[in-house]
Image: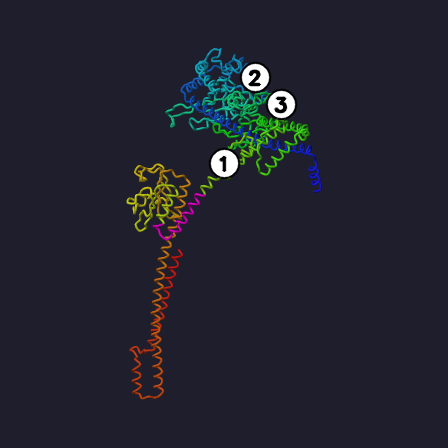
Amino acid sequence: MNIIRYIRDFFRNLRLFYKFQIALFFVSTITLSVMGYFGYTEGKDLLKEKSFNMLRIMAENKRKTIETYFQTLKNQITTVSENPSTLEALKAFQAGMLSHQPIGEAEKKVLERYYSQQVLDMLIYNSLQKEWPENYVPTKPQAQALQYKYIANNPKPFNFRHLLEISADAPQAYDEAHKQFHRSFLTNKTAFELADILLIDKKGNVVYSVAKNIDFGQNLLTSPLRHNGAGALFQRLLQSHEENSVLFRDYEHYIPNQYIPSCFIGTSIYVENQELVSRREKIGAIIFQISNEKITSILTNNQDWAGEGLGVSGEIALVGPEFKLRNNTRRFLEDPVFYQNALLNSERDTVAVERIKRQKTTILHRKYQNQATMDAVNGKSGQKLNTDFLGSEVLDVFMPIDILGVRWAMIAEMDGTEVFSSAEVFRVNLLAISGILFVLVTLLGAYLAQSLANPMRKIQREIAMLSEGVFPKISSRVYHDELGKIDASLNVLISNMRDVAKFAEDIGKGNFDSPFQARNDKDVLSNSLVKMRDSLKQLAIEEGARSWVNTGTAMFSNILRESSDDLQHLAIASVTALVKYLEANQGVFFYYQEDKKCLEAIGTYAYDKEKYWKKTILVGEGIAGQVFLEGSTVYLTEVPESYSKITSGLGYARPRSVLVVPVKSNERIYGVIEIASLEILDKLRVKFAEDMCENIAVTISRIRTAEETQKLLEESQRATEQLRQQEEEMRQNFEELMATQEEMRLRQEKLDILLHGQVQSQNNERILQSLDVDERGHTPEDRIREAIERQKALLDKTYQQNREKEQKIRDKITN
C-alpha cells in the first residue's frame, strides 16, 4: 500500500509536461490495443466463418457433380448393356476369339519379351518390389494371339493402342468384328472420359478392351487377375441375381494398369431365352474403368482452383473408407517435387512417397486420417480447424458422399494463413501504427504540453464535463495542429455522444424507431446500441403481447367472477368481452343442453338476434357442431359465401376470418364460441381465445357444481327438517309414555296398600278387574314397556336412516 501511495503522490506532483506525455502514451496504447484486439478477433472470426461457408458451398457443388457423374455412368453402362449392338459385339468377339488361329513360337517369344521387359519391369518399378511373384502371360493360344496382335505388336504408342482398328496381320473373324464395333466403344470411352471399356463373356474371357491393356484376352475366373480390380468385380456380377444392377469396385492397385490405382463399375449383359423361366439369360458383362484424371479434373476445375474461389491454397479431396485419397492433391499437381519433399520432411512413409513419385499420383498412397475424415466416413457433416501434414492450420469442411453404395468422405480445405492473411495484415499495420504513434507522442509531447496549455485545459474541462455526463458546446475555433485535431475529434466525439444519448433517451421513452446508424462496421458502441435497440424493440413487442394477454386475462377474471352465479349472464358477458377484446365483429355462445342433446345459442354479440337467439345446433352439425364433437379449434380464413354477413348502419360485408373454439376443461366440453371478424386474427389472439374459453369452461363447471351443491344442500335441509319433525313426534310419544308409566306407578302403589291391608276378597277382585289384564295376560305395565321398546327401536332405525342419507349428501358434495 505504501508503494501505491508513493506512486500516486509522485504522479500527482509531476509537471503537466510529463503528465501529458505519460497520459498520452497510455491512452493511445490502451485505446489502440483494445480497438485492435476487438477488430482483429472479430475480423478473424468473420473471415473464418465466411471461408467455412464458401468451402461448404463448393464442397456441396462438387459432391453433387461427382455423384451426378457416377449416376450418369451408371445410366450409360445400363444403356450400353441393353443395346442390341453390344450383344451383337459380344457374340462376334466371343466367336472371333474362339476361332482365332494360334501364333507361332517367334510371336510367343515377342509376347513373353514384352511381358518381361515392359509389364513386369513397370510393375516392379511402380510397386517398389524387388521382383514380381506372378507371370501374367495368358496360357490360352487365342488370348496369346490377340495380345500379340493388339498389344505386343501394336504399332501405336503405349497410351494410343486404342487407335488401332484392325491388325496389320492377316485379318481373321475377330479382326473384322473389331473393325466393326471398336469405333462405337471408343466413342463412348471418349465421350465419358473413361480409362477403358471391357467386354467379358460368361466364362470370364475378356473378349474386348478399348485401351488394350494386359487384361485384354485374359480369363478373369482362372488367371492371376481374378482377384484384382475388374476380375473381382466380374465375379460379383456373376453372383448377382438382380437384372440391371450396377456394381462399383473401389480403388485398388490395378495390375493391368501398371499397378496404378483404378476403380470400376460394371453390369451384366442379358439375352432373351424362351427356354428359361425368366426368359433372360446372363451371357456376360460390361465393365467401365473410370479415369483418374476425370475425377481429378472435376475436383480441381481442370486445375483452375482460383476460378473456383479456392485461392492459392484451397482444394477439395476425396477420401475412402480406409482414409486414403481418391484423387490427386493440389500441392502434388502444382509442384510434385516440393510435395514429395514435404511428405518426407513430415516423416511420412518413405515407400508411399516413392510410389507417389513413380506412379505420378497420390491416389491410395497418402493417408488422410483426422477427426474430420473419420466423421465424414461415419456419415457426419461439419467443419473443423485442423493441422495438415506440414503443421499448418487449415480450415476443413467435411461431408459424406455416396458412390454407388460406397461411402467416401469429401474434404474442402484451405490454409489458415491465406484465410487470415488480411487479419494478419491488419495486425501488422496496427503494430506499425502503434509504433509510429509512440514515437510521435515521445517527440512531440513536450512541445504540445508547453505550447498548447490553454487548449489542453479546454480539452480537460470538456473531457471532465463528458465524464460527468454533461455535453459541452462544440468548439467553433479549432486549431490546425495535433491538438486541433484532438479538439476536432473531441467535437466529433461530443456530437456522437449526443447522438448516442439522444438515441438512448429515445429508447428509454420507448421510441425504438429512432433513426441511428453506426459509422462503420468497427463502430463497436454504435453497433452494440443498434443491437440493443433491436433486442429491446423485440422485447417491447413481446412485453406488449404479454401485457395484452395479462390485461385480457384480468378483465375476463373479473367478468367470470361477477358472472359466476348466472350462466346466461356469463355467456353474454364473456362472448361480448371476447369479441371486443379480439377486435372482432360478431360472436355467439352455443351452450350444450344435456337434456336436449343439442347446442343452443345463449349469448350473442352483434348477431341478428331474431336469427340466432335460441338457435339450436345438433352435435356434429356445421362447423360449431363439428368443433364440439372433435373438441379442437377451427380457424377459417376462406369463409363460404353462405356464411352470415357482418352488418352495420352503412351496409354489410362477408367476414374475412371465422374462429370456432370449444369451451373445454379437463376434456369435458360445455359448448362452443364462434367469432367472425372483418380482419385476420393472428396466432396470439387465437391462443388467447382458446385460453379464455378454457377459463369460461372452468367457470361453467363451477356454476354447475354450485347448482348441484345447492340442490344437495336443499335436499339435506329437507331431510334434516324431516328428522327434526320425527324426533319431535317421538319426543311427544315418549313424554306420553312417561306420563302413562307414572300413572301406572301410582296405581301399583294403591294396589300394594290394598294387598297389605288385608281387604276383603270381593274388593280384591274388583281391584284386580280394574287392572285391565288383556287376553295375553299382560298387565298395563307390560304393555307400556313393550311400547317404549318399540318407540326406541323406531327411533334408532330412523336415526340410522338419516345418518346414511346425510353421509350420501356429503359424498355428493365432496365429489
Q: Nearer the viewer, mark 2 or mark 3?
A: 3
Q: Quadrant of the C terminus?
A: bottom left
From which residue to which does the magenta span run? 547-569
How far separated are the C-alphas under marks 2 and 3?
29 Å
Mark 3 residue element: helix
Question: Horizontal placement of 492 versus 178: left or right?
Answer: right
What amino acid does circle 1 point to?
Asp
Report crowding for label 2: few under 14, some 14 to 19, many 20 or more residues within 10 A (C-alpha). few
Residue position for label 2: 118
Report crowding for label 1: few under 14, some 14 to 19, many 20 or more residues within 10 A (C-alpha). some
Mark 2 residue element: helix
What amino acid does circle 2 point to?
Gln
Mark closest to the chain's N terminus, 2 or 1:
2
Mark number for residue 341?
3
Mark number for residue 807?
none
**Residue 170 colored magenta?**
no
Report crowding for label 3: few under 14, some 14 to 19, many 20 or more residues within 10 A (C-alpha). few
Instruction: Give residue 481's position: percent from left, percent from top.
Output: 63, 27
Instruction: Give residue 72's position: percent from left, percent from top.
Output: 45, 23
What amino acid does circle 3 point to?
Asn
Mark 1 residue element: helix
Q: Nearer the viewer, residue 252 or 57?
A: 57
Mark number for residue 534?
1
